Amino acid sequence: MQSFLHRTTEYAFQLLLTVSSSTLASVTNRLLPLLRRDFIAALPHELALQIVAYAPDLTTIARITCVSKKWRAVAQDNAIWRTLYLRKGWYINERLLAQTYPVDVPLQRDDTKKSAKLDEDRLYRDRLQLEDNWRNGRYTAREIMGHGDAIYCLQFDEDKIISGSRDHQIKIFSLKTGLCRFTLSGHGASVLCLQYDDRHLISGSSDASVIIWDLQAILRDAPPMGPENSVAASAFNPSPYIVRRLRGHTDSVLNLRFDDTTIITCSKDKTMRIWDRWTGELRATLSEHRAAVNAVQFVGHSIVSASGDRFVKVWKWDRMSGAKVVRTLAGHIRGIACVQYDGNVVVSGSSDSTIRIWDAHTGALINTLGGHADLVRTVQFDSEKIVSGGYDKTIKIWDMRTGALLLDLKASPNLAEMAEVGRMMGGHLNRVFKLQFNEARIVSCSQDQRIIVWDFSEGVDTRFFTRPAAQ
């Protein structure tokens, strides 16, 4: 069979050598369509989508759109852009998408319905622009004031910022307007730490107590605050809003974390305490550290604590067998002030001015970041970056993979320049105590009594890809 095909091919070739150039050109024109078969155009649209979805990046998609009208139609389908978006590991608020664009609308290809559907290529390009803003330091900064002393802690979402201060108060500010919606007074000393979810706000204080507040009731009763309604902040009688006080620590409560069932607190008294969120029952007291336990994080039954004794400890805990240390991370040469843990990686900041990145499962040191000139008081990370703040009055953004310093947010050393551009264009003027970030912004607080919102989203619609800041 093969020899027959070979002879036939050779015969055809020899025959073509005998014809004129014009005849040869005509035959070539008839053969070319057979040699240039457009497999994408020949396939059903759904199968073509599956193939084009393997394109690795935006550059490849741009090249595909230049091949033909059919290829362009496939490359511009929303399903392709959704695949590219999710491949980046970016967050998308599916609930908000479903509310804004009804079921199946994002997958429609009918051009007559563009006004009723989400253009997911725009979503992808906006998210890409946001990443570029972070990478190149394009942001706006504005300050929020209202506390009468140093601000030690905060948390924010797309609606509000909740902060705690040395003035003994907790304040809830509008993220949009910066105006204080109301003030809570209940602690007898500085509010050092807090966390909230949809149901509760939980705070810890230098008065050694923990208060569980009914945040739902607080927000229900709070006066509305918007650009058209400048209602004065309310200092509520706290009693109706306090669900429970937790007492047990003998010194300042320095940090706390909670999930659906459990609250874990840590203290200057060198202990951590594990509480039932709903009953207030004390389940366990952990006392392996030899100095103040400055920070705690937990994911499921794995707890990570950081102490002035220079150690990070990884614990396993369950209600039946209690808690035990399974790993001690040693490397910092001075006390550790802050830690974040995501279940796999631990990032710690210390008064030795360094940040260390650890493998939580093996205890191996992955990287050490040096750049702060004083104690590193607060850290947070995601898959792309680490953001840190310290007593050197700066906020630094680092590449999570390489450890390279990407951006340094700080006040201008030139006081005349700061006066010219306006105070809010500078950074903090004193120690940075706490920061958090999400996809669009960093919010930080300081001994200078200011909250600064560093917004990287100018010109970008971030509705569908921002989430509450991690703790």
Image (cartoon, rainbow, N blue to C red):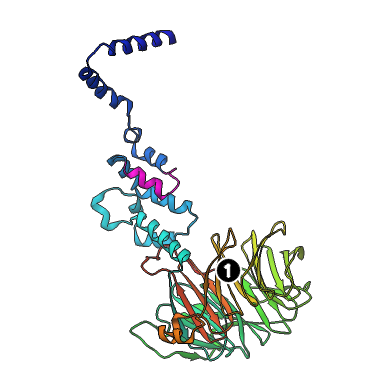
At 46% across and 74% down in the image, what residue appears?
454
Residue 425 drawn above or below residue 283: below
Q: Residue 199's spot in the image, x, y percent? A: 53, 74
State the residue in front, 425 or 469: 425
- Residue type at tag 1: Gln
Residue 264 drawn above or below residue 120: below
Residue 226 drawn above or below residue 65: below
State the residue in front, 434 or 280: 434
Q: Residue 80's spot in the image, x, y percent? A: 39, 47
At 37% across and 62% down in the image, what residue appears?
99
Residue 1 visible in the displayed image: no
In the picture, residue 339 is in which quadrant? bottom right
Give the left or right position of residue 98, taking residue 18 as reference: right
Residue 470 visible in the displayed image: yes
Q: Residue furthest left?
A: 22
Q: Residue 357's spot in the image, x, y percent? A: 65, 63
Residue range in magenta is 53-66
Q: Tell me the element at label 1.
A: strand
Query: What residue sits right under mark 1 in the picture?
Result: 380
Q: Residue 181's spot in the image, x, y percent? A: 44, 85
